[in-house]
Image (cartoon, rainbow, N blue to C red):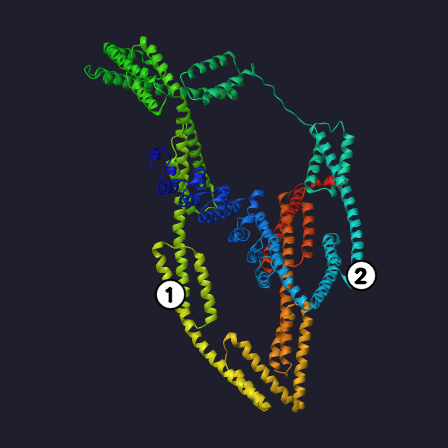
């Protein structure tokens, strides 16, 4: 150990083991120290330990390139990539610098982590796919990515046929699956010299022509015009060949239909604009009439009023129910306006009427205020002013203001009386307390230590002040008694003052010496001790108080000035500590708010924060209380939340235990089953369910797992034994079939065999059971080949047999052609059933000779092509249903938006809008079956609410008409 280690931080110790201990103690917030160690330490193991905790990306990259030790370089490279992945996963909007890191990890397993991460931004995933060349990573992105553009970009860069097949089968994006299938088919077509590509092109052209016919037949051409334009753009891109003239003709007819519809729309809009102008004019006229009524100018403008009434009556049919109600109200007011109105007014104003309400308000305010010593004075002032008014009324008993005045005065008198009684009671209680204090002062022993006596007297005086408060004149007599009781301590006070002055002189001498020393922590500590001792010394004479105070203050300031640099450094350190502790508080508060982070991870972070808090030094004194309170509040909130999490975890584990018990019972019920496939699938489902259930209480974990595993193992062991027995029998069957093939081959080599022998061999073949899976195709081809050779040889000698085989051949050729024809409409369920029937019929027809194998190969290829096309067409149909679903959801939103602004003025227009939306609904095609009922219910509910509101409004108008038939007069006029 070096002597200089005492003056160095632990991480700079000459002993590598000590430096390793220091690194282990450093927190994640000491990145600057970790960086210095990783870059400059002489020991490779120490640098490696620092690299493991270092999170600075630039430093890790530098170390991975420049470090002298190969292991440290590899570790730094790996840590660099880990931190890059963390940064890219957490970045909502990554910068250009962030994206530049992708070049370093594009072909590593970290690329897969980024593409798998649910929080990785689309920008990062898209850029990674763009620069990555690793086929497995690209295939994974094409299969799993939720963004169709990213998945499509990844799929385009995949070149392996096997990976493309995986994408075509498993990708989450229908368009990506479709694109992968098309690429595979294109490659296959290229191998077939482009024949199938031409057929596919022709089928696409026919599909576009059919779709053009469908769009042209729609009732609302303007609604589908964007779709037709997209179709024409697609046709232009595809190239229509001999179908170009047909689709051009359809488009010309559709365009003419659109022009006519557009003209009709313009005319309808013009008519609607005229209607709205008329409605606006009638609304303005009604407002003018209402203003004339409100300003009492109906008689002065009788001609204009009559003109407005005529206009409104004539145009009433255009307006909504709310407007009609307003008009009817105005009409009645016009009718009633000229009727004579009898107004009875009595001017019984009392003298000084303006003063009485003001006095009442003052009296109310006084009554609402808590009673105090000034309340009586304020009441007398109000009473004198009221009496000056000399209010005398002939109906004095009925004067409401006088009644209110008397009631308030009586209530206030009651409150004042209660207050005075309470005040007298408090005075008596306080007097007893003060007398008790005087008695305790008189009981003090003069021989007791004066400091203790002085302390007690001061305490008694403080108690006296707290009891008396501001009402010291009420207790004047008792105060005189108190002064007399304490007078005997005056001489003792003078002696104590002299003694205290000596003690203060000693402290001042110490301070004089301290002013000559340079600033340091020891000086500040000594000053603090002197200050505390100064405060503990008792009082001195008032004449010398200022002198001592000035001397002390002068020395204090000089010592502080000497320590200014040290204090500044200390304050800076405390300010830094304050920032660190505030940051720790903020981290705890963020943990409390964070609802995404797993609660156990949050607890680990909280423990780290608390440990860091202990290691941070002191903060400025003025911030201690607030900071401590903040930390305690944040910690309390966290642990309250943690307690709830633990409780929820316990409840969840118990619930999980009950679920796993149920799974055990299901597995135990199945363990004796002999339905191998169904039971295996069911047990696998139970195992998947087991994985998804989550943990159970630790005390029950082993027991429940052993129970479940025992039940599953019992079945699978039984199944294994069964299939081992079956495998043995399959091998025997294979041996028997090989023997049969050898028998037929010997028969063929010898030119022997009859039709009856062949049929017998076929029956024997069928009677033999299954063979091992890997041998199925080989043994079947061997049997079929020799069987057809013998059959063909027999047919040459038997014209009837030859004719029969030829008939079978022709039927099979016809079946192949039929499946080829069906492929054009592979999406039909009926055709799919028909192909399956043909496959069944093919098996029942039997063999047709030497050409049978080639025919079977062709038949299998056309069937595979049919079902591949069917799968693609079903994907297209599903995509169309998804598109229709989006359109219908938009219609649902539009119907629901009508409810937000539904009132008497808008209900008519809203009902018409609903009718229009329902027409559009009918024009949209089918949606996915599982969404159909729910979507329709949502749409229909919103529409029904609009019509229900409209019917209620119409019923309201009808009821109003029945209640007041006179209201119909203006409408009929």
Query: What distance separates the C-alpha of mark 2 from that of mark 1?
Result: 73 Å
Residue 859 figure quarter: bottom right
Q: Residues within 10 Å of mark 2 (few under 14, many from 20)?
A: few
Residue 189 vertical position relative to residue 533 in the rendered view, above or below? below
Q: Nearer the viewer, residue 213 or 285?
A: 213
Query: Dot 1 lies on which element?
Result: helix
Q: Nearer the viewer, residue 464 or 141?
A: 141
Q: Residues within 10 Å of mark 1 (few under 14, many from 20)?
A: some
Question: Could you tell whether 645 is left or right of 954 in the image?
Answer: left
Where residue 722 appears, x then y in whole percent? 43, 74
Task: Please identify the residue farthest to the front as the structure is shown.
Answer: 68
Asked whether disc 2 touches disc 1, contact meaning CB atoms under 8 Å apart, the reply is no
Which residue: 55% across, 46% down? 101
Q: Earlier in the sequence, mark 2 or mark 1?
A: 2
Task: Please identify the residue farthest to the left as the structure is shown.
Answer: 447
Question: Could you tell whether 121 is left or right of 321 in the image?
Answer: left
Indicate which disc residue 245 carries.
Answer: 2
Q: The N terminus is located in which quarter? A: top left
Residue 166 vertical position relative to residue 390 in the rendered view, above or below? below
User: What is the tally of numbered marks visible in this picture?
Assistant: 2
Residue 799 vertical position relative to residue 476 in the rendered view, above or below? below
Q: Nearer the viewer, residue 602 or 973?
A: 602
Where residue 260 appears, x then y in whole percent? 80, 52
Query: Dot 2 lies on which element?
Result: helix
Where residue 672 appears, x then y in whole percent? 40, 71
Where residue 965 appears, x then y in whole percent? 69, 41
Indicate which disc residue 710 carries.
Answer: 1
- In this orientation, does residue 161 appear? yes
Residue 191 figure quarter: bottom right
- In this orientation, does residue 463 appear? no
Task: Please identify the residue farthest to the top as the structure is shown.
Answer: 543
């Amino acid at each position: 150990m070096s002597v200089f280690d005492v003056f160095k931080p632990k991480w700079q110790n000459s002993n590598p083991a000590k430096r390793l201990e220091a690194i282990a103690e450093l927190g994640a917030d000491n990145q600057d120290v970790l960086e210095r160690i990783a870059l400059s330490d002489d020991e490779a193991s120490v640098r490696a330990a620092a690299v493991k905790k270092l999170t600075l990306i630039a430093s890790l990259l530098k170390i991975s390139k420049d470090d002298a030790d190969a292991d440290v370089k590899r570790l730094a490279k790996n840590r660099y990539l880990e931190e890059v992945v963390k940064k890219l996963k957490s970045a909502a909007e990554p910068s250009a610098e962030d994206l530049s890191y992708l070049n370093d990890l594009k072909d590593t397993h970290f690329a897969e982590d980024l593409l798998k991460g649910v929080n990785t931004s689309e920008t990062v995933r898209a850029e990674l796919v763009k620069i990555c060349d690793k086929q497995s990573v690209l295939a994974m992105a094409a299969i799993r990515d939720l963004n169709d553009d990213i998945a499509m970009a990844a799929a385009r860069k995949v070149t392996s046929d096997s990976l493309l097949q995986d994408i075509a089968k498993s990708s989450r994006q229908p368009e990506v699956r479709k694109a992968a299938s098309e690429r595979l088919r294109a490659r296959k077509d290229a191998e077939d010299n482009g024949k199938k590509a031409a057929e596919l092109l022709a089928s696409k052209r026919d599909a576009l022509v059919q779709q053009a016919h469908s769009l042209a037949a729609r009732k609302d051409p303007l609604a589908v015009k964007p779709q037709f334009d997209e179709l024409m753009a697609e046709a232009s891109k595809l190239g229509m060949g001999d179908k170009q003239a047909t689709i051009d003709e359809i488009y010309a007819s559709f365009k003419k239909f659109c022009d006519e519809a557009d003209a009709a729309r313009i005319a309808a809009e013009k008519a609607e604009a005229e209607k709205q102008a008329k409605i606006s004019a009638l609304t303005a006229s009604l407002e003018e009439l209402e203003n004339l009524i409100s300003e009492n100018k109906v008689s002065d403008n009788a001609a204009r009023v009559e003109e407005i009434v005529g206009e409104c009556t004539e145009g009433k049919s255009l307006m909504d129910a709310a407007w009609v109600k307003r008009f009817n109200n105005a009409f009645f007011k016009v009718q009633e306006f000229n009727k004579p109105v009898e107004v009875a007014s009595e001017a019984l104003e009392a003298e000084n009427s303006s003063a009485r309400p003001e006095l009442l308000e003052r009296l109310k305010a006084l009554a609402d205020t808590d009673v105090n010593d000034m309340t009586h004075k304020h009441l007398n002032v109000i009473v004198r002013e009221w009496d000056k008014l000399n209010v005398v009324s002939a109906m004095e008993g009925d004067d409401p203001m006088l009644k209110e005045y008397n009631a308030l005065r009586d209530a206030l008198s009651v409150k004042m009386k209660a207050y005075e009684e309470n005040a007298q009671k408090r005075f008596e209680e306080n007097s007893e307390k003060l007398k008790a204090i005087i008695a305790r002062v008189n009981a003090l022993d003069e021989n007791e230590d004066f400091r203790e006596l002085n302390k007690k007297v001061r305490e008694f005086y403080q108690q006296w002040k707290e009891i008396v408060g501001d009402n010291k004149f009420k207790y004047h007599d008792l105060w005189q008694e108190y002064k007399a009781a304490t007078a005997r301590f005056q001489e003792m006070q003078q002696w104590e003052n002299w003694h205290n002055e000596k003690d203060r002189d000693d402290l001042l001498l110490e301070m004089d010496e301290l002013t000559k020393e340079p600033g340091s922590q020891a000086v500040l500590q000594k000053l603090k001790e002197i200050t505390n001792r100064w405060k503990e010394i008792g009082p001195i004479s008032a004449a010398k108080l200022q002198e001592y105070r000035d001397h002390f203050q002068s020395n204090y300031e000089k010592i502080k000035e000497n320590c200014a640099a040290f204090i500044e450094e200390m304050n800076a350190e405390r300010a830094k500590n304050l920032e660190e502790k505030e940051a720790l508080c903020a981290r705890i508060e963020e943990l409390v708010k964070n609802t995404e982070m797993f609660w156990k991870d949050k607890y680990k972070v909280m423990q780290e924060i608390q440990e860091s808090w202990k290691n941070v030094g002191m903060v400025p004194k003025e911030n201690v209380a607030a900071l401590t309170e903040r930390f305690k509040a944040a910690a309390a909130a966290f642990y309250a939340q943690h307690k709830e999490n633990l409780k929820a975890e316990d409840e969840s584990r118990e619930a999980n235990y009950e679920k796993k018990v149920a799974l055990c019972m299901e597995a135990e019920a199945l363990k004796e089953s002999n339905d191998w496939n169904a039971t295996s699938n069911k047990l696998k489902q139970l195992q998947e369910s087991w994985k998804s259930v989550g943990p159970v209480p630790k005390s029950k974990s082993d027991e429940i797992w052993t129970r479940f595993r025992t039940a599953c193992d019992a079945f699978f062991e039984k199944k294994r034994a069964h299939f081992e027995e079956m495998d043995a029998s399959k091998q025997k069957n294979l041996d028997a079939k090989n023997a049969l093939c050898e028998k037929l081959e010997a028969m063929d080599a010898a030119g022997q065999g009859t039709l009856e022998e062949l049929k017998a061999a076929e029956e024997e073949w069928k009677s033999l059971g299954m063979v091992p899976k890997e041998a199925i195709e080989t043994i079947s081809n061997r049997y079929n080949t020799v069987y057809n050779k013998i059959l063909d040889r027999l047919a040459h000698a038997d014209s009837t047999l030859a004719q029969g085989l030829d008939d079978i051949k022709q039927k099979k050729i016809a079946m192949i052609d039929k499946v080829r024809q069906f492929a054009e409409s592979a999406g039909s369920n009926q055709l799919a059933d028909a192909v399956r029937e043909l496959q069944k019929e093919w098996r029942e027809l039997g063999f047709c000779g030497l050409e049978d194998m080639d025919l079977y190969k062709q038949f299998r290829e056309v069937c595979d092509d049919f079902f591949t096309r069917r799968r693609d067409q079903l994907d297209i149909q599903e995509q169309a249903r998804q598109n229709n679903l989006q359109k219908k959801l938009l219609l649902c939103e539009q119907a629901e938006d009508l409810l937000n602004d539904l009132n008497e003025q808008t209900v008519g227009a809203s009902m018409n809008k609903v009718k229009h939306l329902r027409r559009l609904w009918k024009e949209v095609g089918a949606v996915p079956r599982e969404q159909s009922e729910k979507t329709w219910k949502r749409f229909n509910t919103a529409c029904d609410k609009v019509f229900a509101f409209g019917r209620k409004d119409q019923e309201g108008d009808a009821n109003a008409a029945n209640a007041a038939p006179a209201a119909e007069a203006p409408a009929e006029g």
